[in-house]
Image (spheres, rainbow, N blue to C red):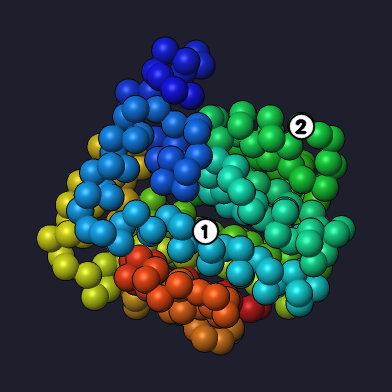
């Protein structure tokens, strides 16, 4: 997508879209000028902002690899966003070739692009259009139940999702609804934007940018994010900046400032 005239029918190219903004920030091409302008404003606020989406994506890959190496064969990726390099099924299948993955998002743009990417006929991967604020509908979906056997260990991913759910929509209840369906030995993989340790004015200005997009973001404190893991055992090293969660040996120190904008962790049921 190089200009707004290429927008498919029914797609609003004038309002920044969170999935497209994230795509652009990761170097993707499925975005419009409104998305690029919004991301540009975020990047201009502080030097590390350019790497904030990248370090979150790196955390997702490490966490999925962790789960796969512990025998997890089924993954439910909630709020998956637009496809990008190193998707959950690609990472999981390197360790577990028989892994099954369901991607869920409430954005029709995401669903169209994801299905196009996965049009090769791989029956072990599905895309479901659904809103995570309605867990029962997702948990009752035919494709979800075709690929995910909730009597066996699975991994549920809520990566860069819950800060888009307002407090009055009870994000903790959303997490609990999915986790209650998980069998023992399952994992919750979660990351969330945080205001912890950040300049309040900078947090406010970032939230103002997101307020003009299709998703209003809430940067939450560590204690608020930690509650999402109630009833689960946090895997070491616990809830940390995403760059500090089991970093690779070749992790770049210059990305740590970007990692501080996220808290990420993995909980085991």
**Vertical relation: 263 (above or below) 11:** below
Q: Is residue 230 visible?
A: no
> In the structure shown, which secondary structural element does the residue marked by tag 2 occupy?
loop
Query: For mark 2, what is the residue?
Result: 119
Earlier in the chain: of badge 1 and badge 2, it is 1
Q: What numbered label is drawn on residue 57?
A: 1
Q: What numbered label is drawn on residue 23?
A: none
Q: Is residue 76 left or right of residue 42?
A: right
**Vertical relation: 119 (above or below) 229:** above
Q: Residue furthest bottom?
A: 236
- Whole-percent x and y of residue 58? 53, 63
Q: How many marks?
A: 2
- Whole-percent x and y of residue 76? 67, 55
Residue drawn 39% across the image and 68% down it: 255
Tell me if mark 1 has few (under 14), some (14-19) or many (20+) residues whose alpha carbon lies within 10 angstroms of its own: many
Tag 1–tag 2 contact (CB < 8 Å): no
Q: Looking at the image, which is closer to me, 204 or 148?
A: 204
Q: Looking at the image, which is closer to me, 46 or 176?
A: 46
> How far is the residue under mark 1 from the one under mark 2?
23 Å
Residue drawn 47% across the image and 61% down it: 56
């Amino acid at each position: 997508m190089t200009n707004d005239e290429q927008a498919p029918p029914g797609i609003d190219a004038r309002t920044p879209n969170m999935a497209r903004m994230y795509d652009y920030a990761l170097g993707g091409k499925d975005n419009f000028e409104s998305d690029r302008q919004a991301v540009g404003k975020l990047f201009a606020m502080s030097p590390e902002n350019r790497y904030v989406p990248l370090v979150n994506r790196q955390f997702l890959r490490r966490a999925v690899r962790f789960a796969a190496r512990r025998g997890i064969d089924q993954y439910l990726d909630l709020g998956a966003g637009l496809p990008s390099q190193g998707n959950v099924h690609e990472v999981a299948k390197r360790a577990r070739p028989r892994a099954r993955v369901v991607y869920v998002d409430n954005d029709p743009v995401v669903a169209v692009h994801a299905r196009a990417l996965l049009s090769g006929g791989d029956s072990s991967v599905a895309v479901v259009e659904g809103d995570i604020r309605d867990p029962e509908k997702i948990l009752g979906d035919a494709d979800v139940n075709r690929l995910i056997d909730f009597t066996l260990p699975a991994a549920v991913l809520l990566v860069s999702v819950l800060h888009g759910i307002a407090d009055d929509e009870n994000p903790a209840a959303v997490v609990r609804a999915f986790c209650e369906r998980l069998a023992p030995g399952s994992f919750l993989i979660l990351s969330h934007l945080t205001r912890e340790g950040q300049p309040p004015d900078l947090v406010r200005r970032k939230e103002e940018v997101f307020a003009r997009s299709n998703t209003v973001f809430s940067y939450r404190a560590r204690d608020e994010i930690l509650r999402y893991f109630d009833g689960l055992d946090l895997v070491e090293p616990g809830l940390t900046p995403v760059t500090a969660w089991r970093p690779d040996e070749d992790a770049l120190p210059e990305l740590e400032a970007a990692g501080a904008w996220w808290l990420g962790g993995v909980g085991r049921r």
